[in-house]
Image (cartoon, helix red, strand yellow):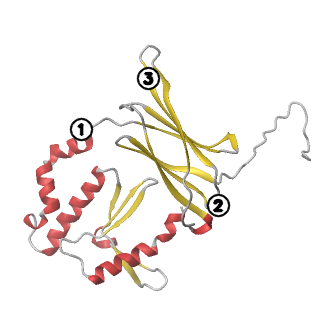
């Protein structure tokens, strides 16, 4: 390898980098199924998902697998930029219970010893009481919150005040369902091109859930007109490049 000064007593580290053409982007649990989102090179086939469900053995207090299955990663319908695409596999589980651990491994069927990616997920509690919502309820009852969301005009005089009440309620709602929320306010709601100063569009809230969704939310207590809808479509197109990140 043409390494100079390679002598006993002088340790050397060798790092081999292998670009991975596929990875698991997200995994979630939906009722009795696990939803697996995979990003892969458009032309890459023969990918396989190995799924196992593990449960704690009360005698050993260790997780032990009790169910396994495999499924081929679906083929892409349309390539995105740079030749990558996203596909979703939905796999129904057998006899899963809360606190079971779901292990998902991504391999290539022709190279089964190479693990391309691996992740896990705990089966959530059924009908669990959300502590975030309970904490909010201590400050503002959920009935009042619901009214501020559905009937904001009852809490504000004038269009500006009504829209502010509605925006706050929408931001609370997005936070409760797991989004990180940025309320832009009046000072930063308009997006302009720095070079020209041209207005691209506007949004009241940016909300993000990791590896899942990025939302650009425009809150208005009235029905949006055609101009508003076109503005939001232009704004969405402006951020299309974020799909590649």
Q: Nearer the viewer, residue 41 or 219?
A: 41
Q: Which mark is residue 43?
A: 2
- The image quarter in which residue 111 lies: top right
Q: Nearer the viewer, residue 144 or 46?
A: 46
Question: What is the crowding at mark 1: few (fewer than 14 residues within 10 Å), some, or many (at least 20)?
Answer: few
Q: Is residue 82 left or right of residue 30?
A: right
Residue 162's place in the image compared with 27, above or below, is below
Q: Nearer the viewer, residue 216 or 161?
A: 216
> Which mark lies nearer to you, 3 or 2?
2
Q: Is residue 131 left or right of residue 90?
A: left
Residue found at the far top of this picture: 59
Question: What is the crowding at mark 3: few (fewer than 14 residues within 10 Å), some, or many (at least 20)?
Answer: some
In terms of sequence position, does the residue under pointer 1 or pointer 2 come before the other?
2
Q: Which mark is residue 56?
A: 3
Q: Nearer the viewer, residue 148 or 68?
A: 68
Q: Is residue 191 visible?
A: no
So how many labels did they put on this image? 3
**Mark 1–mark 2 distance (CA, rounded to whole Å):** 44 Å
> Which mark lies nearer to you, 1 or 2?
2
Residue 169's place in the image compared with 116, above or below, is below
Q: What residue is drawn where x is 69% and y is 53%?
A: 19
Judged from the image, the secondary structure of the residue bearing numbered disc 2 is: loop
**Mark 3–mark 2 distance (CA, rounded to whole Å):** 40 Å
- Tell me residue 146's x, y (percent): 15, 55
**Mark 1–mark 3 distance (CA, rounded to whole Å):** 23 Å
Q: What residue is drawn where x is 26% and y is 41%?
A: 130
> Which mark lies nearer to you, 1 or 3?
3
Judged from the image, the secondary structure of the residue bearing numbered disc 1 is: loop
- Tell me residue 30's x, y (percent): 37, 45
Residue beneath disc 1: 129
Q: Is residue 16 left or right of residue 67?
A: right
In terms of sequence position, does the residue under pointer 1 or pointer 3 come before the other?
3
């Amino acid at each position: 390898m043409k390494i100079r000064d390679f002598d006993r007593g002088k340790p050397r580290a060798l790092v081999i980098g292998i670009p991975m053409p596929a990875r698991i982007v997200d995994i979630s649990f939906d009722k009795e199924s696990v939803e697996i989102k995979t990003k892969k090179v458009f032309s890459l086939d023969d990918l396989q998902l190995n799924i196992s469900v593990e449960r704690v053995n009360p005698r050993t207090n260790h997780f032990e697998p009790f169910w396994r299955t495999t499924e081929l990663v679906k083929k892409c319908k349309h390539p995105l930029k740079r030749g990558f695409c996203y596909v979703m596999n939905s796999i129904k589980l057998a006899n899963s219970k809360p606190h079971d651990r779901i292990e998902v491994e991504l391999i290539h069927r022709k190279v089964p010893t190479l693990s391309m990616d691996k992740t896990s997920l705990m089966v959530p509690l059924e009908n669990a009481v959300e502590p975030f919502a309970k904490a909010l309820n201590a400050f503002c009852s959920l009935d009042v919150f619901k009214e501020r969301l559905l009937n904001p005009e009852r809490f504000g005089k004038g269009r500006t005040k009504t829209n502010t009440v509605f925006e706050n309620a929408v931001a609370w709602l997005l936070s409760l369902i797991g989004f990180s929320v940025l309320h832009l306010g009046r000072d930063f709601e308009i997006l302009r091109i720095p070079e020209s100063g041209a207005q691209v569009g506007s949004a009241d809230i940016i909300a993000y859930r990791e590896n899942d969704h990025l939302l650009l939310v425009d809150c208005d207590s009235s029905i949006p007109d055609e101009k508003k809808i076109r503005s939001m479509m232009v704004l969405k197109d402006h951020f299309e490049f974020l799909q590649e990140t």
